[in-house]
Structures are given as C-alpha cells and as structure tokens.
Image (cartoon, helix red, strand yellow):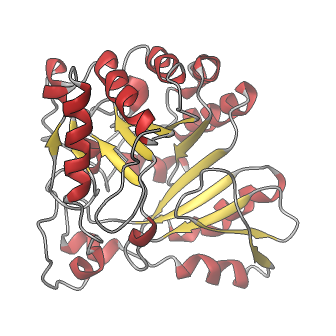
Amino acid sequence: MIEPLTDSFGRIHDYIRISVTDRCNLRCVYCMPEEGMVFQPHDEIMSYEEIASVLRVLAPMGVSKVRLTGGEPLVRKDLESLVAMISDIEGIQDISLTTNGLLLSSKARLLKEAGLTRINISLDSLHKERYAKITRGGDVRKVLEGIEAAYEAGLDPIKLNMVLMKGFNEDEIRDFVAMTIHRPLHVRFIEYMPIGQASEEWRKTYIPLSHVTDVCHEAGWTIQDDQGPAGNGPSRNMKIQGAAGTFGLIHPVSDHFCDSCNRLRLTADGHIKACLYWSDEYNVRRVAHDPEATASLFRKALGNKPQNHEMALALEKKAQSHTPTNRRMSQIGG
C-alpha cells in the first residue's frame, strides 16, 4: 500500500460512498421535493468503467470499503455488473449497498452472487398509508418482500435505516426495536439532517435520538450496549437483553462523530465530497483516465476537509464557518 489517504487532522480514510445515480423511484420528504427536481443527463453520470478506474487508484491508497448509493441505486441498469467489477479489485474487502428496497426482491440474489457483502434498507414506517405519505407513493409491502429476499440470498448483516421525524414516525420506535427481538435484524435510528434544506420545517421535524432509549425504558425492556454488526460505523449500538438483533443510534446533529470520520463521497456526476455537509467539491471525472491526477485530486480534497460539520449550529440558527451544500441528499448519495 502507498501512503494512505489522510487529512490534515490525521484522520485516515478507508471508506468511500459512491452514488451511481441521482434518480429515485420515491420522493421521500427528507430527501427530495415532491416536484421540480432536475436530474443529471445520462451522459453526465459516471460510467461503471470510470467508477472502477477511480477505485483501482484508491485501493492501493488504503480504501477497502465501498458503499453504493443513489438516489436509488437499483434503478441503474445492471448494477450487479458494477458490483462484480469492484469485487475484482485487489484490496476492496467490503461492498455494501443502500437501497429503498422496492426493487430488491428481484435483485438480491444477483447482487450477492456478484460480490455484494451486506445491505442497508431504508424503511421509515411499517404502516402502509404512513409509508406512502413519507415516501410520496411507495409501497411498504415491496420493501418487506425485499428484506425477505435479502435474507434468502444470504446477505448479512441486513440493516434497516429509519430517519426519525417528529410528527411522522416517532410513535413507531417501539415497533422497530421489537423487530430485533426474534430476528437478527439491525435497526438504526438516524437523526434528520439539514442537507440542502436548513429550513423551519426541518427544525420542527427534528427530534433527538434520546427519545429512542426513553421509549425502550417505558416498554420495560432491559437494554445493553452491544458491539453491533460489522461495518456499523458511527452508530452507538444496543440490544434488548436476549434479542437476536440490535438497534443503533446515529446522531450526526446532536452528537457528531467527525473526529473519527473515515469517509469520502463520490457523487453520481463525478465530484469528490470529503464532507457530506459542506459545499466543497472536486470533479474527478475529468481526470478519471489518469491515475496520478486522480490520486492527487483526492489528496487535495482531503487536504481541504474541515475538522467537523456544524449541523447543530444550523439547528440553533447560528453562523457557520463554511458554506453548507445546496445539493439534496439524493444528489450527493446517502
């Protein structure tokens, strides 16, 4: 391995999240506006070959974990062929996917056979009508079918991501935690982040994750800290005593985990984002054919990475030191 990817604060980056598309078959309230989204033309989206070329540069620099995101990555044709290309790159040890699960039932086995290691499925409600409201039209039954298909395909671990939102789904915390009792599911509650929209609506909808443990205590459950499944990143993991699975709290706003950040992001149109929150971007697609230039650009992006984001200041309407991104989460990659 050559010199690892290290920023000016000594953080080593061995993990990249790659968005393969900015398009999605849902319009979740925290991710996209209902109307008016302008999507990138297909010729402005990185090809699978370009993505693989970038990873062949990053792997010798210590990047060993890759997560494919969107938008919704499964709307991109033949995604399993990209997974196979990545799995052939020496040094890449872990390939994961974040999906809304709607198309997963027909893809889970193909992805597993291509080399996918594990999967995260976004699921913000178990109630049919409420899920349709949050996602603006989604069918929760298809997501549940996708979860079963992932089990049958042997993907492990399976993590369910729930964005906690006041007035939308906070009354389902108990139901989600209960899902971990008898099955080895790993539910993660995620604070609603102000990505591209630090609005009054966001401030009204935001709820701190301390509410999760309050609900567990009210239910009479004994909870204990747990190591959690592999690749659990910044989640604080817990489990109900005797449960088969775990639940975790990811609180980027109220208790950020920037000091241990090891992540890079690559947008679908080929921009490096060293930090999810700030606007700084570096277009690597124009040099993807040049390994030396690609490596140099990633080092430049890391050299300019701030020490932390300041989402909590956005919640308090206080001044921030940098310019927050105006891209929506779907345009960056989850």
Q: Horizontal and vertical percent for residue 321?
A: 13, 76
Residue 134 visible from this viewpoint:
yes
Residue 241 falls left or right of residue 56: right
Q: 6 or 195, which lies in front?
A: 6
Q: 233 or 39, which lies in front?
A: 233
Q: Horizontal and vertical percent for residue 12?
A: 42, 56
Q: Horizontal and vertical percent for residue 227?
A: 71, 64
Q: 168 or 194, which lies in front?
A: 194
Q: Horizontal and vertical percent for residue 1?
A: 47, 38
Q: Quadrant of residue 270?
A: top left
Q: Residue at x 43, y 26 (%)?
A: 74
Residue 168 falls left or right of residue 277: right
Residue 285 falls left or right of residue 60: left
Q: Residue at x 33, y 69 (%)?
A: 9
Q: Image height check: is 54 above or below 193? A: above
Number of dots carrying numbers: 0
Q: Quadrant of residue 140?
A: top right
Q: Image height check: is 295 above or below 175? A: above
Q: Residue at x 19, y 32 (%)?
A: 293
